[in-house]
Image (cartoon, helix red, strand yellow):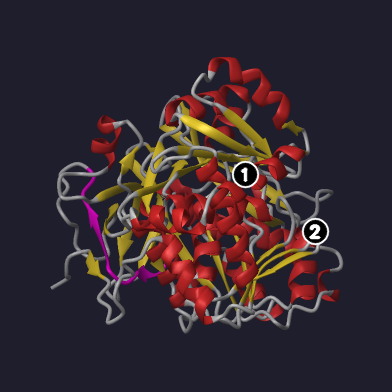
Amino acid sequence: MTGASYSHGTSATPLLGDTIGAGLDRTVAAWPEREALVDVESGRRWTYAEFAADVDRLACALLASGVAKGDRVGVWAVNCPEWVLVQYATARVGAIMVNINPAYRTHEVEYVLGQAGVSLLFASVRHKTSDYRTMVDQVRPRCPQLREAVFFGEPGWDALLDRASAVRPEELRARADELSCDDPINIQYTSGTTGFPKGATLSHHNILNNGYFVGEMIAYSERDRVCIPVPFYHCFGMVMGNLAATSHGACMVIPAPSFDPKATLDAVQRERCTSLYGVPTMFIAELNLPDFAAYDLSSLRTGIMAGSPCPVEVMKRVVTEMHMAEVSICYGMTETSPVSLQTRRDDDLEHRTGTVGRVLPHIEVKVVDPVTGVTRPRGTAGELCTRGYSVMLGYWNEPERTAEAIDPGRWMHTGDLAHMREDGYVEIVGRIKDMIIRGGENIYPREVEEFLHGHPKIRDVQVVGVPHEKYGEEVLACVIPHDAAEPPTLEEVRAHCEGRLAHYKIPSRLQVLDAFPMTVSGKVRKVELRHEYGGG
């Protein structure tokens, strides 16, 4: 008889009961002279002893600035060392760091500052087309709770650090003694496709443990050097990257302020990185560099790919040409700190491309009927739910929206369609809202995308449902060709599918693109594809 789609991550390794500050202290005591942080662009470097000293200086400056336990401190910036210092210094003093997407404009940042009640804001000065100083000036009259804005690299940053001398070390220790590992420490705004974003509120316990166990799964130690081209404002950067590194004495390497494939591979080569992070589109961009073969990536052994499914051919190249034999696939969401499922170092290619892994230690997952909530048999699709230490405290000041996401049993409902294999590995078949219903038939875009990746003219593909008068929805394939001069035709795509996919899954429309619309964290905005090319 097929078992229920439920799995629990048993483990002999206990959860950490520390605050983030206490966890950092333990690492510094063990490896004070190991490198903690490298910023490739500026050439700045910190050992763990130096990093802890600068974190404590900033923490003292926050105390001198009147930052109380539970106060919200915003960070609106691209990746830089100061971002990391703020992350650990706010944790030291028990302030709640509010991550703000660097792509936000005035309307969005005004909402976040007001909804979270941010009193102190750290920000970049500018990046690409974003002038953060001008935007802060524009929204400040409508954000009366914002009493100070400090810009990285400007005199105001140095002036703030100078305040640290007014606070004695024992005052900082006294504040640390007041903190509990269950205190809220971070608010991350989820990028909802409708309405305003929600502020997922996470504790020390949530994110310190998640970073630690993600690092455990890929055997991090003080000898590892982790290249982090994914954004810090997202859990991928600050938890799976920074906290996974510092909980194991590994080094955080910042290749550039925002993702640049050339800068990323250059950082791996120069810094002899052992681990590299990215979403599949980042790895595709790196592999497609004209001079890719010239980079020495032999120091790599592992890394994390997350955010969306990885095509088989891409994974093969990552393992062989990038030397990442132990690369891991992670699945999660901001509300679960973020990772719930992860492949293991010795998993085969099929498990790394066909699944998102199995449950992490100390976490439970199940697949349920989206309507009744009853757990489904293994091998049948339903909504993926997760429970455990990683589930957020709730959405900041939004109890109703929290109750919609977390049921009375403390299960977080992910909104993802999945099925659990007999071996406990989970396949994601799509978002409930992305599922295409054509003439009563359910179509999971992931299955069609994976199949179309095998077409010789297609480099990348996204499948979405668009309105159809007769069937309700039809299948649109948006493709990026290998050769822009010779893109595939709809007839070629359909011929490729004929006899190999059920007729109702075969795309009836084709759109050739140069690039997909992306979020800052590297996810494809399917809602934009539907709107732009589906008339809805």
The answer to whether residue 365 is above or below residue 139 is below
Name the image quarter holding residue 281. Answer: bottom right
- Across and down, in percent, residue 317 comes to 67, 74
Residue beneath the point at 69% across and 53% down: 80
Q: What numbered label is drawn on residue 163?
A: 1
Label 2: which residue? 41
Residue 353 visible to an observer of this rendering: no
- In the rendered image, residue 363 lying in the magenta stretch gets the answer yes
Q: Name the one closer to the observer, 32 or 286.
A: 32
Q: What is the secondary structure assignment of the residue under circle 1? A: helix
Q: Name the one closer to the observer, 457 or 365.
A: 365
Q: Name the one closer to the observer, 28 or 161.
A: 161
- Across and down, in percent, residue 70 comes to 38, 41
- Across and down, in percent, residue 38 comes to 71, 66
Which one is closest to the eye, mark 2 or mark 1?
1
Q: In the image, what residue type sits under mark 1?
A: Arg
State left or right for residue 227 relative to residue 398: right
Q: Earlier in the sequence, mark 2 or mark 1?
A: 2
Residue beneath the point at 58% across and 45% down: 524
- Across and down, in percent, residue 437 comes to 38, 39
Q: Give the distance between the C-alpha atoms of the residues marked 2 and 1, in whole angstroms.
A: 28 Å
Magenta stretch bounds: 355-370
**Quarter of the rendering occupied by the N terminus:** bottom left
Name the image quarter holding residue 419. Answer: bottom left
Q: What is the secondary structure assignment of the residue under circle 2? A: loop
- In the rendered image, residue 226 lying in the magenta stretch gets the answer no
Residue beneath the point at 43% across and 59% down: 173
Q: How many marks?
A: 2
Specify the farthest residue to the top.
141
Crowding at dot 1, Cα within 10 Å, few <14 / some 14-19 / many 20+, comes out as some
Name the image quarter holding residue 4. Answer: bottom left
State left or right for residue 292 relative to residue 327: right
